[in-house]
Image (tube, helix red, strand yellow):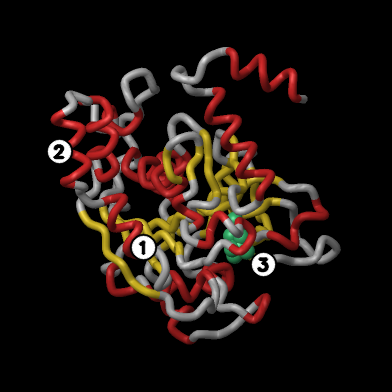
Amino acid sequence: MPLEGIYGRNEPMTLVTSATSAIKTAVLPVAGIGTRFLPATKAIPKEMLPIVDRPLIQYAIDEAVAAGISNFVFVVGSHNRSLLEAHFGSSPVLEKILKTRGKSQELELVTGTSKGITSINFVTQDEPLGLGHAVWCARDFINDGPFAVMLPDDLVQAEPGCMWQMVDAFNKYGGNIVAVEDVPRDQTNKYGILDVDEDDGRIASARGLVEKPNPEDAPSTLSVIGRYILGPEVLEHLERGEKGAGNEIQLTDAIATTIGRVDFRGLRFTGQRFDCGSKAGFVAANVAYALARSDIPDDFKVLLKSLV
Ligand code: G1P
């Protein structure tokens, strides 16, 4: 049971089953400085803020590991590399104290942060030039094959996990795949939006992709959330460093330029997505994950009801 130690005794365990495939590497762009969460993010990087008792980034890693991914590339800023190394590395002093005190469950939680990980490589994104640029910074570790991109801000509560569902779809269809959900039309200017060709309700094949279109220009309301499986072709566009929406180098544009050569599909994943880049989404995620935990007493539900 590979993730037992990470989840603790009473939590559901995710197993790697049929969704094993060629996707072995995930790129996690985490160079942002988290201005929306100041002052919490003055000293603690955004991806290290906890949802209940585990940092946001741990959920993304566990989701990836459950999908058969074991190599990770963290695209970091100068502020957060050492904390990520501390979280995913060993902690001899803490481990010794827990061992001496016979706290075996806590010890498992500490050593379990890196369970299923074969490698973590760090690359630094010196300037905030956009998501496409962040992915391009990771190019040396992509090895000419398909790879995943995960934005830890987008937390997806799902069983099996969202990346597992993506890998499963990739095994069937290949090509470039993004996780998608419908958003209200007045929010299309916050997302990459698909220009849909065919749609069977779960898989939408697309003829185009536009970054943050105004509602009146949006080709649909089907929006990309932070889970991608991409082929190395996207790097050819990123190499050119062309700026797009918001004067940033956009991953959306790189994907769009491959359409025609590489099939492009959106997967309507099963699960609940929380935008943990916003305060409301972050708090909602904490509530949802707490409600799903067997070690948080029922009193919590009673308290919640009384508060709302
Ligand atoms: C990024 C992408 C966007 C995508 C979104 C998902 O935008 O550029 O296409 O829909 O992530 O969260 P950001 O949220 O970084 O502005």
User: Foreground: 20 or 84?
Assistant: 84
Amino acid tagged 2 = Lys
Q: Alpha-carbon distance for marks 2 and 3? A: 52 Å
Decide which of tag 2 and tag 3 comes sooner along the chain.
Answer: 2
Disc number lying in front (2 or 1): 2
Task: Report whether the residue tagged 2 is closer than 8 Å to ligand 1.
Answer: no
Q: Is residue 19 left or right of residue 201?
A: left
For the point 56% across and 34% down, which residue is it? Answer: 271
Q: Are marks 1 and 3 in contact (CB under 8 Å)?
A: no
Q: Where 77 falls versus 264 (above or below)?
A: below
Q: Which is nearer the N-term, disc 2 or disc 1?
A: 1
Mark 2 neighbour class, 10 Å CA radius: few under 14, some 14 to 19, many 20 or more: few
**Tag 3 residue:** 210
> Which quadrant does the C terminus fall into?
top right
Kind of residue at disc 1: Phe
Circle on res. 96: 2
**Secondary structure state at the residue bearing disc 2:** helix
Give the vertical position of 130 relative to 86 (above or below): below
Q: For the residue carrying disc 3, how many other residues have a C-alpha within 10 Å: few (<14), some (14-19), or many (20+)?
A: many
In which quarter of the view is residue 140 placed?
bottom left
Between residues 155 and 173, which one lies in front from this camera angle?
155
State the residue position of label 1.
74
Give coordinates of residue 63: x percent, y percent.
40, 41
CA separation in Å, label 2 and label 1? 28 Å
Mark 1: which secondary structure?
A: strand
Query: Where's residue 160, x and y in %?
Result: 43, 31
Image vertical order of residue 45 relative to residue 20, above or below:
below
Amino acid on which the number 3 mark rests in the picture: Val
